């Protein structure tokens, strides 16, 4: 009997060792940016109303009779014209001059639901979308549109609402098939929202140099009264005490991206959209950010995070970032100070598309960064950075991860499986120390990474979609972690497993017969 148990134990051990490896409204408005004209009928253009002064604008604003589309020479925040200076401006210039200037930029204001289609080119202007108390869908349709603020101080498209959790208005930016669209803008700098009648109440939030600067710039902090603060049309931000520096305001609002939204923002369509940030982030929301449909080609260049959903305050409840496109390139500019390529403070979910996510090459940033889990469920994903957040093992698609000594920019990287088959090959656009790769066709038991060498094949945006040959690469050492792959059995291992199962069944029958006989 002891021999039977020993034989059974050996078979069981073999089986266990194998099992470890299995693992909108119909209303439409057309805006020709070249001539700043619009019409509900393309054949009948009308001039857009322009309000040159705040006084002229307020007369119509207070009577609730603003047109569907209008132009102002300022961005209105609900109280006055937006102020551009930041406290840092004063501190850097070592000046106590708190004269506030209005934002010197034209604003094309959208004051309606439905489809608003933009075409043509304009510089020195931005699009402002007031969604406060608006119910319905607003579709910003880009038809070979080019919008350049010609400024680092304002986003090119700003969707604003004082309530970050407002969901009665759905804003979607759509690109038409066959079109190429370009958006360039910056960051709307923070403005103090401490009421001038309550300044003494907030002095306790500051200490040391921050308190000194607070006392020095009290006139700046007191731009509004506490009642006026309640009328601000933009989402406000409450700073953490520990983050206050250089006399930062305790309450402020800001639009951090070339495209910014205080509420959820959606992207869809079949066209091409390039977003370039001249200051800070590329596309930023204080709610969810969603790219849907599995179509559209996007290219995001930023001076900070390319895509970002931010938990700017404790009362935010939605910060998920979901991507399903044809292609998306998110690349932090090398002359920036820092930046993650794709940063979600909620969940980060990739469902499809060819995704490149390249973080800043020098700062401790990641290609994919998430506060509540990264899930890769589809697409071809190539991610680089100096840091790497873990990808959830609940992801529906396999991925591999490697960290290594720095690989310099403009280097060919080739990944091979255990049979020397090429998994993928691409050219780096910057120095990297971490690499994440995922594909629906990814099956391997081990892999090797090579740099340099000669490659022949078809390449698109740095990724080789077809490889005819590869020679003379240098294999590099790396650390492997955060790996989620299935063990794919070959014909021999499948046959062995079947034999073991049959043997176990026969052994069980033999043991049963043996026990019955001994009982007799």
Image (spheres, rainbow, N blue to C red):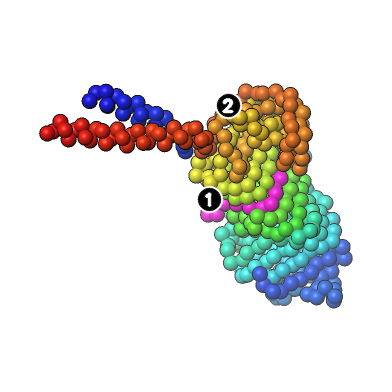
Can you tell which quarter of the image residue 81 is in?
Answer: bottom right
The answer to whether residue 121 is magenta is: no
Can you tell which quarter of the image residue 457 is in?
Answer: top right
Tell me which numbered mark, 1 or 2, is placed earlier along the sequence: 1
Image x and y of residue 223, in percent: 68, 55
SS at mark 2 in the image: strand
Question: Which residues, given as a range, are shown in magenta?
Answer: 314-330
Looking at the image, residue 7 lies above or below residue 314: above
Q: Residue at x 35, y 30 (%)?
A: 12
Image x and y of residue 6, in percent: 29, 24
Taking depth in this image into account, of 271 and 194 the one nearest to the observer is 271
Q: Residue at x 72, y 63 (%)?
A: 140
Badge 1: few (under 14), some or many (20 or more) residues near its Cα, within 10 Å? few
Question: Would residue 57 be seen by someone viewing this image from the given angle?
Answer: no
How far, Cα to Cα, is label 1 from label 2?
A: 37 Å
Q: Give the farthest residue toward the left.
A: 520
Q: Residue at x 52, y 35 (%)?
A: 490
Looking at the image, residue 214 lies above or below residue 513: below
Numbered label attached to residue 518: none
Numbered label attached to residue 479: 2
Image x and y of residue 149, in percent: 80, 54
């Amino acid at each position: 009997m002891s021999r039977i148990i020993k034989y059974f134990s050996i078979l069981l051990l073999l089986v266990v060792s194998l099992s470890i490896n299995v693992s909108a409204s119909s209303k439409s408005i057309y805006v020709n940016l070249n001539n700043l004209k619009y019409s509900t009928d393309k054949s009948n253009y009308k001039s857009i109303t322009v309000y040159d002064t705040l006084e002229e604008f307020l007369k119509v604003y207070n009577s609730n009779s603003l047109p569907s589309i209008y132009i102002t020479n300022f961005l209105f925040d609900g109280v006055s014209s937006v102020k551009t200076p930041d406290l840092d401006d004063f501190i850097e210039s070592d000046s106590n001059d708190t004269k506030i200037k209005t934002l010197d930029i034209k604003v094309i204001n959208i004051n309606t639901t439905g489809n608003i289609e933009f075409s043509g080119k304009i510089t020195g202007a931005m699009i402002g979308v007031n969604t406060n108390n608006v119910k319905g869908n607003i579709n910003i349709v880009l038809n070979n549109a080019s919008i350049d603020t010609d400024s680092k101080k304002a986003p090119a498209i700003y969707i604003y609402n004082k309530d970050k959790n407002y969901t009665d208005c759905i804003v979607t930016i759509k690109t038409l098939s066959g079109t190429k669209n370009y958006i360039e803008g910056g960051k709307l700098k923070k403005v103090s929202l401490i009421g001038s009648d309550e300044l003494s109440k907030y002095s306790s939030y500051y200490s040391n140099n921050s308190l000194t600067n607070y006392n020095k710039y009290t006139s700046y902090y007191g731009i509004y009264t506490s009642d006026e603060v309640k009328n601000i049309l933009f989402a406000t931000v409450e700073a953490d005490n520990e983050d206050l520096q250089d006399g930062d305001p305790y309450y402020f609002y800001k639009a951090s991206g070339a495209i910014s939204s205080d509420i959820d923002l959606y992207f869809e369509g079949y066209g091409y959209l390039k977003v370039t940030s001249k200051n800070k982030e590329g596309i930023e929301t204080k709610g969810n950010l969603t790219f849907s449909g599995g179509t559209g080609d996007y290219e995001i260049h930023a001076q900070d995070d390319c895509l970002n959903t931010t938990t700017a305050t404790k009362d935010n409840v939605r910060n998920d970032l979901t991507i399903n496109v044809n292609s998306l390139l998110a690349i932090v500019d090398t002359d920036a100070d820092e930046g993650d390529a794709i940063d979600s403070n909620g969940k980060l979910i990739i469902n499809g598309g060819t995704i490149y996510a390249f973080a800043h090459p020098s700062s401790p940033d990641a290609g994919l960064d998430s506060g509540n889990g990264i899930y890769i469920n589809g697409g071809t994903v190539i991610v680089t950075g100096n840091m790497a957040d873990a990808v959830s093992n609940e992801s529906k698609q396999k991925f591999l991860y490697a960290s290594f000594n720095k690989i310099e920019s403009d280097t060919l990287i080739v990944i091979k499986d255990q049979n020397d088959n090429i998994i993928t090959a691409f050219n780096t656009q910057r120095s990297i120390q971490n690499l994440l790769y995922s594909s629906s066709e990814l099956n391997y038991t081990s892999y090797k990474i090579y740099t340099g060498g000669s490659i022949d094949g078809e390449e698109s945006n740095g990724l080789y979609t077809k490889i005819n040959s590869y020679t003379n690469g240098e294999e590099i050492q790396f650390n492997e972690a955060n790996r989620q792959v299935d063990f794919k059995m070959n014909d021999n291992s499948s046959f062995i497993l079947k034999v073991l199962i049959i043997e176990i069944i026969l052994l069980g029958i033999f043991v049963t017969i043996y026990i019955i006989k001994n009982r007799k």
